[in-house]
Amino acid sequence: MDSKMEEKDFLACCGSKKFAEEMTSSGPFANLDHAIDVARDIWFNKVDVNGWLEAFAAHPQIGQNPSAKHPSDTSAQWSKGEQSTALQTATDSSLQELSDWNARYWKKFGFVFLICASGRTASEILAELKRRYPNRPIVEFEIAAQEQMKVTELRLAKLFSTQVKAASISTQ
Amino acid sequence: MDSKMEEKDFLACCGSKKFAEEMTSSGPFANLDHAIDVARDIWFNKVDVNGWLEAFAAHPQIGQNPSAKHPSDTSAQWSKGEQSTALQTATDSSLQELSDWNARYWKKFGFVFLICASGRTASEILAELKRRYPNRPIVEFEIAAQEQMKVTELRLAKLFSTQVKAASISTQ
């Protein structure tokens, strides 16, 4: 597969500049599995803790409109899709409770509550936030990085499927 | 013991503002052991990862003059004392090698190489730097936080001994 993926595409998958640069210089990738293997190695072994914080900062607060926060339209659109189950199952009061707990979480940990929201209801997300809140900051930091990796994998899959579609149209 | 310890004293022990604030509001302490117990709880359970990075940033690079970097005279003076064995055992070439490896370390991890240098020779410190260098960023982040705590404990001991001396002079 002759990939046309650019740094901005990888940055929409994960908001660490180092991650995006390393993915760009590591490509093109034979397939999605190959890209995910490389992405995991870069994220967990090469991106430093400042890069993790940079990637976390690119996420909207769960339950909030992502467009204001997100660095790219692609990322904002994907984030909206990932949160669609949560938004469909949310009530005004559960959104309020989520917002209150997000604020408490931010105050304790200094970064946004990060969860791979895809397919999860608002109450599942809230329960998970409450369960993780007592964690030590360093423990929560590593859990957030694992959640970021899940989000990145889903987005890489979307990126590959878009590329395959584009390639099949251009060769018709 | 009626402690006269202020926020700036605790900030000289550990450069996280949150740490210094929480120590100040938790005092006065009955004795050094009490202060260390509270300090460990604050550092590992309450200071977030941004606070860890803030504390790391207050340290000079091992083998370098601390005064330019350090936020307080007390901290600079303590840092010099902690590194006295290293500086006495260092040669020009070992200082150069330490400087080169410090730069590599910074490039990989995004924060200064942190070690409780007290009583360690330059070559011991260099060996430890090389041993830790292959670590994953998150692993190294937690080791650095443990080293910071060792430094903090030594400095709290100095702070208490200064206070006891001052108290004994004022009551004579």
Image (cartoon, coloured by chain):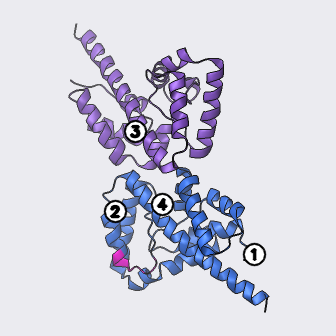
Chain colours: A blue, B purple
- Type of the residue with mark 1: Asp
Q: Give the range drawn in magenta.
A: A118-124
Residue A25: quarter of image: bottom right
Disc 4 chain ID: A
A83 to B106, vertically: above or below: below
x%, y% of residue A28?
Answer: 71, 69
Marks 2 and 3 in Cβ contact (< 8 Å) = no
x%, y% of residue A43?
Answer: 56, 59
- Pick the residue in front: B126 or A57: B126
Q: What element carries label 3?
A: helix
Residue B155: quarter of image: top left
Disc 3 chain ID: B
Q: Mark 4 points at which residue?
A: A145
Whichever of labels 4 and 1 marks the residue nearer the N terminus, that label is: 1
A71 to A47, vertically: above or below: below
- Type of the residue with mark 4: Ala
Q: Name the residue under label 2.
A: A132
Q: Mark 1 points at which residue?
A: A2
Q: Can residue B142 be seen in this view?
A: yes
Instruction: Say if labels 2 and 4 share a chain.
Output: yes
B80 to B112, vertically: above or below: above
Mark carried by residue B146: 3
Q: Which residue is drawn at 62% across and 23% down?
A: B95
Distance in Å between CA atoms under marks 2 and 3: 23 Å
